[in-house]
Image (cartoon, rainbow, N blue to C red):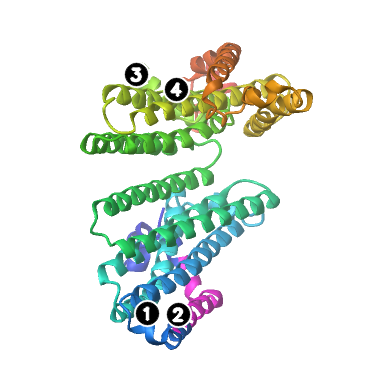
Amino acid sequence: MTAEPVLKEGGVKVGLGDRMNPIVVKELRQAVQSRFVIAALLTLLSVQIVAIGIYILASGASLFGFDAGRQAFLMLFSILQSIGMIFAPLYTGARLAAERSDVNVDLLFITTIKPRSIIAGKMFAAVTLTALIYSACMPFMTFTYFLRGIDLPSIFISLGIGFVVVIACVQAAVFVALIPASRALKVIFGLVALIIFGIAYFVTVIGVSDLVRRGFTSRLSWQVFAVAGAIIAFLIGLFFVMSVALIMPVASNRALSVRLFITAAWLLTGVAALTNGLIEENHRMPIAWLLAFEIILAPAIFVAVSERDQPGRRVMRSIPGSALGRAQAFFFFSGAAGGLAWASAMIALTLAAAWAWAKSFPAYGNASDLVDEVKWMGGMCLYFFCYAMTGALLRRRLFSRARTELTWLIGAALLVVGSLTPFLIGYIIFFNEQWWSEDFGAWWVGNPFAWGNKGHRVLYASVGGVWAVLVAAMSLPWFIERVKRFRRAAPAVTRDAFESLPRAAVSESPSATD
């Protein structure tokens, strides 16, 4: 419930502030009153003025060259992008992490605002602050046009690219801030996020520099621009739905929106990649599509086995009554068995589509590369499946007291041990043997990232295939039991309805003792 219907019922005139998302209103009001935001904005403007002034004074005769404007723009863009990628994610993520802390976490559970509205409000406020920063620095960027060497479309497109990258980093920071972990783990996740942001910063600056120098008129430039835009849009959407899932109650259907989003993106981008392959008569885009989604879906196996073994009553009440609807819902609703089936099916469909496409058009460019990537990604996902399922088996049979959400940790520990142990044993025992220097790649068996050794792929596939069959057979009774239990739950009997039932019906009702 929002303030608007309440005010309308009371006869109060509803204004624009009452129609807006209350999270947006709160965040923007606190931002304009924050000394940190004001100080950061003034500091950025001061740096821009000093930087352009020093550049003009120190350039001398080179200021009259034909690339002075381009050099000045790239300098100012680097400053703006560095401050934007540090300030906006840090400000938004730190505030949300404080609200997610044990002291204030009750506010997220007692509010009537929907989780999607909370994340959307946080992001809209962050977008507004970022737009304020970029609009304040835009006059300095536009001034470089008069120094020659750069045109206005390149300036505005470059600023748009930087703006979207900052928004993607903000959404990633929101996701990291919502991860349910201890303070130490959150610090580690934050450092990892900063490293990733640093890599994204250098990639953005280098890419903008290349595009500004080459111009946006070439066909390749627009293809790169479209692909990068699609990747950033997908990441923003993915982190958004995952952030919404993290603040939803544990008993709710948290996985539904995430799996639906990934499936829809998989289908749309797959059609676009294959269409591009037909037009260009090249397999570059199908290869990129295959790599991107296999990298996303492989860790999804670990996430799936870490979900609840049995969905909560809230999820089961929303299961469709028909057999067809129940079968479709099984793949997308929350639950370990359904998540495992969805991730495995998506991986298999991705590999099958890429393989069929390569075999259907063998004369297109990079056909052999596409086939090789199918084998590489298929082997990696096979080992990920083995380690995740083995971790789930160990948790159910040996570590039954461990919480279900820690299954990924057991599987990850097995992955590290299984990837390094065979190689270390071979190195310690057979290091002085001649065959070790010739066939040491065989000792990388068990490592999901060692499929680049083409001479030993048969060994890797044989071990992985036998292992996968064994863990699947051992987990089959558990999986079948979860499929049988995936039924629509009867609605709970309320107190008034319970008291109005006849005495005989009350004694026979299964809900009477629940």
Q: Nearer the viewer, mark 3 or mark 4?
A: 3
Q: Does the magenta stretch include residue 460?
A: no
> What distance separates the C-alpha of mark 2 from that of mark 3?
61 Å
> Where in the figure is residue 41, as x and y percent of width and height?
48, 77
- Residue at numbered disc 2: 48
Q: Name the residue under label 3.
A: 324
Of labels 2 and 3, earlier in sequence is 2
Alpha carbons under labels 2 and 4: distance apart: 61 Å
Q: Residues within 10 Å of mark 2 (few under 14, many from 20)?
A: many
Question: Which circle marks residue 162 in the picture?
Answer: none
Which residue is at the front of the view, 47 or 112?
A: 47
Residue drawn at x 39%, y 58% as measured from the top left: 207
Judged by depth in the image, the label closer to the viewer, 2 or 4, is: 2
Q: Distance between the residues labelled 3 and 4?
A: 13 Å
In the picture shown, does residue 143 fall above or below 107?
below
Circle 3 packing at 10 Å, graded few (<14), some (14-19), many (20+), is: few
Region rendered in magenta: 26-49
Instruction: Residue type at mark 3: give it.
Output: Leu
* Marks 1,2: beta carbons within 8 A: yes
Magenta part, dominant SS: helix
Q: Does the magenta stretch include residue 48?
A: yes
